[in-house]
């Protein structure tokens, strides 16, 4: 330890010596320096650096109060003792007030060493205390920093719940500024009125329950309600009395909400699980049943507690157990698994019941803990399925040997087509398998002939729209096979869901089509031949007519020439029948309306040249006749009209021929020919006349056409001809 | 008075004979009758008739309309068509050649004659 350094401020050296002696006497070792001016004193303070100053109160050049003032103006603390010759009470008090540590009167110098010791001791204690205070200050700063930066809200309240301190996090939780909270009542400001009494009670019981944790609702400045977790502890003063509380607050609103939602969903789920007819099973990773819904009893006869804790395998047949655990195993290693699968349960009586299961995994904190299985009794569905399967097998057996396709075809509400049922004949018709088209029309669409596709789809849509029978012939192009003609026939039906389904068949009609094509081709050929034949016949008749005309030129006999002329007109009328026939669309029937008027006009032209002036009046309906009727009729018409031109108006002048054609009530064709000419003598029977032409007329109508012919001579001559006619009946 | 010179193209000889006789009696000159298109072209260019009476159905590959088209490339000779077929089948093609008339057989010379006379009435005066 270094020596104690004492600075004496004294003008009398003897006094210094006495003081030194007295101090040394008490065993205190020290160095010393003596000054008696202010300058020397200041210099010694920085150079000598005394631990203790002993100063005379009054000196010629300096004084104790001044030294004290200088000393106390420094940062460091140097103890100072006033040593004086005489001192009254007043001076002593002044010195002590000014900061002196002690004072000693020279007459009682013996007290000096004790004063030195005491002052030094006091000084050391003070110094230590100061250090401690400094340390405390530092740690408090640290602590405050910590509190300020704490993520959790921190609040200190007095016993009456007035807020003394809050940190930033607390302000953030509630949305207040610090100055808005300090001094306010905590319970009033931050909590709900229903909880005020609760909070006050907590604070008042702080001395009995110094620490506790609880969850409570709080209210933010915005009015929003939040959930808080509070850790409260008592704050005590130095005497150990409780003076308030400090609370650590955490906003747990999110957690609370999640908890509440979970609780709600759990309640919902539980009631669902308990009330559903489906069986709900929860198992752990070993397959042990940890939960089973009440419906287990109804389904299997087992009670819940008979099953819980057992392995799921014990409920299943051996195969099903292996199968189910295998699926869960696959799921465990993250493999893809079937979303639903079927298992067989054994009930209490040993009967096997089919169930369909769906599983979902149960995880806790991201770790797989088990599985939840929802199982549905599918006994009835199985029965139906089996029946359907039986029917399906029957249908397949039944249709297996039919080379044609028997099918059910469906147009779904979205407009897509599919073929739910198809017989094996689909291989022959479309080159695909029944299962290819159950849900997909494209294997068929693909092979439809491109030229026929649009038409087929159009016909399907038409049938769907009008629910009319679907009949369509189309071609199919299957790679590696020649094009085939298919006939499709089916009846549509609208299903409750709005889709449309057809039941029907498709047959290969390629051979029939080929024959039809041949027939059509030969028909065209036949028609060409027929047309040619008519044309040639007509041509030949004209040649004959021309020959007769050439001959007639050379006759020189008027009567004979007229006979030739009659024959020529008849040949021309027959030629006209042939012309009309090849002009006819069907090459077999001619329109009498056109034919009669044309014959009459031709005759009119022929006879007008010979000086007659006879007008034609037609009232003709459309009547079609075939060649068997047309030829004799043409001869009859020609004869009768010619006769009018030749005989009815012997004196020339104006005449009228009326021609009426119609069908009577009995569907007989009636032709009337009337003129306003001279008529015939009353006693003349035309049937018995010598005219070859008229003889022919009666014979043709009555004998050949099985018709009726009559005449009436009144204001001219009226002919009435009627005959039964069937245009389709052609004599072969 | 100069006679109207007519070339008769008709593959049926009897009809051709009849027509030519009748037309001669009506005072026309028949400068020839031929049965096929090639002969018709040759004869028409040789004889340069005033009129051709042309049957549409002829022997050989060429029909009457085609034959007339070829003749018209060389000579602007008026034509009257005759046909066993109804008008509609050939009318469109025939009309391009602007015929004086179009007759459907049977043909009576007495119907043709007035039409020819009417057409050539300036020349006949």
Image (cartoon, coloured by chain):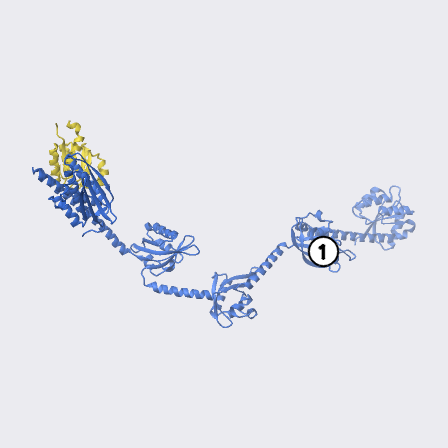
Chain colours: A blue, B yellow
- Residue A347 rendering spot, x and y as whole percentages: 50, 70
- Residue closer to the observer: A484 or A138: A484
Q: Is residue A656 left or right of residue A84?
A: left
Relative image position of residue A180 (x, y in whole percent)? 71, 47
Labels in figure, total: 1
* Left or right: A484, with A302 as reference point: left
Q: Nearer the viewer, residue A314 or A376?
A: A376
* Residue at left offset 15%, top offset 28%: B124
Q: Chain of mark 1?
A: A
Which residue ends up furthest to the bottom in the rendered image? A349
Q: Is residue A297 above or below residue A454?
A: below
**Residue in the image at 69% along x and 58% along y:** A213
Residue A42 visible? The answer is yes
The answer to which quarter of the image holds residue A484 is bottom left
Q: Position of residue A120 (x, y in %)?
A: 83, 52
Q: Which residue is mark 1?
A: A199
Between A70 and A313, the one nearer to me in the picture: A313
Q: Is residue A114 left or right of residue A671?
A: right
Would residue B106 be seen by someone viewing this image from the given angle?
no
Q: Residue furthest front?
A: A683
Q: Looking at the figure, which quarter contains the N terminus of chain A? A: bottom right
Neighbourhood count class around disc 1 (C-alpha, 10 Å): few under 14, some 14–19, many 20 upward: some
Q: Where A196 falls versus A323 (above or below)?
A: above
Check disc 1 and report its element: helix, strand or loop: helix
Percent across and percent down for residue A231 are: 69, 57
């Amino acid at each position: 330890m270094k020596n104690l350094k004492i600075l004496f401020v004294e003008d009398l050296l003897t006094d210094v010596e006495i003081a030194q002696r007295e101090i040394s006497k008490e065993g205190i070792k020290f160095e010393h320096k003596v000054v008696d001016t202010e300058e020397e004193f200041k210099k010694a303070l920085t150079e000598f650096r005394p631990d203790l100053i002993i100063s005379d109160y009054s000196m010629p050049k300096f004084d104790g109060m001044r030294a004290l003032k200088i000393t106390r103006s420094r940062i460091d603390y140097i103890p100072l003792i006033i040593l004086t010759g005489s001192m009254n009470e007043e001076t002593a008090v002044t010195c002590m007030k000014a900061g002196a540590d002690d004072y000693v009167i020279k007459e009682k110098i013996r007290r000096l060493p004790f004063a030195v010791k005491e002052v030094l001791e006091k000084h050391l204690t003070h110094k230590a205390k100061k250090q401690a205070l400094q340390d405390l200050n530092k740690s408090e700063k640290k602590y405050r920093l910590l509190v300020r930066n704490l993520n959790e809200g921190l609040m200190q309240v007095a016993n009456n719940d007035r807020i003394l301190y809050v940190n930033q996090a607390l302000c953030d939780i509630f949305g207040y500024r610090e100055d808005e909270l300090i001094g306010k009542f905590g319970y009033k400001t931050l909590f709900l009125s229903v909880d005020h009494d609760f909070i006050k009670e907590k604070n008042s019981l702080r001395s009995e329950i110094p620490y506790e944790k609880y969850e409570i609702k709080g209210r933010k400045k915005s009015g929003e309600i939040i959930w808080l977790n509070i850790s409260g502890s008592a704050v005590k003063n130095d005497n150990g009395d409780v003076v308030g509380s400090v609370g650590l607050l955490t906003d747990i609103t999110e957690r609370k909400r999640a908890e509440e939602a979970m609780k709600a969903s759990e309640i919902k789920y539980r009631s669902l699980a308990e009330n559903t007819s489906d069986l709900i099973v929860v198992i752990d990773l070993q397959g042990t049943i940890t939960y089973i819904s009440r419906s287990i009893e109804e389904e299997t006869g087992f009670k819940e507690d008979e099953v819980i804790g057992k392995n799921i395998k014990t409920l299943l047949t051996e195969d099903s157990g292996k199968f189910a655990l295998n699926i869960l195993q696959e799921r465990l290693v993250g493999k893809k698994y079937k979303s639903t699968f079927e298992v067989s349960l054994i009930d209490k009586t040993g009967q096997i019941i089919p169930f369909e299961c769906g599983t979902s995994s149960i995880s806790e904190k991201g770790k797989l803990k088990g599985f939840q299985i929802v199982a549905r009794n599918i006994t009835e569905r199985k029965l139906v399925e089996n029946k359907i399967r039986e029917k399906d097998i029957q249908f397949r057996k039944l249709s297996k040997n039919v080379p044609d396709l028997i099918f059910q075809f469906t147009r779904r509400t979205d407009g897509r087509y599919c073929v739910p049922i198809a017989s094996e004949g689909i291989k022959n018709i479309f080159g695909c398998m029944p299962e290819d088209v159950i849900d997909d029309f494209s294997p068929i669409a693909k092979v439809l002939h491109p030229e026929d596709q649009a038409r087929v789809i159009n016909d399907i849509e038409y049938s769907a729209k009008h629910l009319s029978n679907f009949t369509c012939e189309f071609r199919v192009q299957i790679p590696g096979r020649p094009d085939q003609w298919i006939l499709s026939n089916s009846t549509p039906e609208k299903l409750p869901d709005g889709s449309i389904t057809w039941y029907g068949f498709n047959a290969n009609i390629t051979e029939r089509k080929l024959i039809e094509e041949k027939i059509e081709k030969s028909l065209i050929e036949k028609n060409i031949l027929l047309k040619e034949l008519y044309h040639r016949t007509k041509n030949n008749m004209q040649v004959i007519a021309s020959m007769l005309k050439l001959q007639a030129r050379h006759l020189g006999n008027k009567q004979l020439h007229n006979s030739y002329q009659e024959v020529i007109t008849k040949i021309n009328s027959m030629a006209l029948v042939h012309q009309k026939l090849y002009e006819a669309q069907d090459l077999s029937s001619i329109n009498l309306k056109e034919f009669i008027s044309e014959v009459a006009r031709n005759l009119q032209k022929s006879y007008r040249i010979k000086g007659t002036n006879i007008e034609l009046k037609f009232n003709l309906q459309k009547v079609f006749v075939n060649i068997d009727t047309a030829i004799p009729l043409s001869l009859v018409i020609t004869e009768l009209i010619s006769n009018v031109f030749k005989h009815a108006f012997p004196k020339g002048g104006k005449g009228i021929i009326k021609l009426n054609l119609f069908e009577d009530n009995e569907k007989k064709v009636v032709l009337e020919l009337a003129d306003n000419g001279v008529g015939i003598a009353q006693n003349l029977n035309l049937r018995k006349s010598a005219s070859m032409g008229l003889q022919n007329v009666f014979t043709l109508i009555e004998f050949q056409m099985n018709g009726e012919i009559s005449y009436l001579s009144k204001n001219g001559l009226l002919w009435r001809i009627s005959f039964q006619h069937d245009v389709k009946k052609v004599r072969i | 008075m100069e006679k109207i010179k007519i070339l008769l193209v008709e593959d049926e000889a009897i009809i051709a004979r009849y027509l030519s006789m009748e037309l001669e009696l009506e005072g026309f000159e028949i400068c020839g009758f031929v049965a096929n298109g090639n002969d018709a072209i040759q004869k028409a260019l040789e004889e340069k008739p005033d009129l051709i009476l042309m049957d549409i159905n002829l022997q050989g590959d060429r029909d009457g309309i085609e034959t007339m088209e070829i003749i018209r490339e060389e000579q602007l000779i008026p034509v009257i068509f005759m046909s066993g077929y109804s008008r509609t089948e050939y009318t469109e093609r025939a009309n391009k050649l602007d015929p004086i008339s179009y007759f459907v057989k049977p043909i009576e010379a007495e119907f043709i004659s007035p039409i020819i006379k009417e057409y050539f009435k300036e020349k006949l005066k």
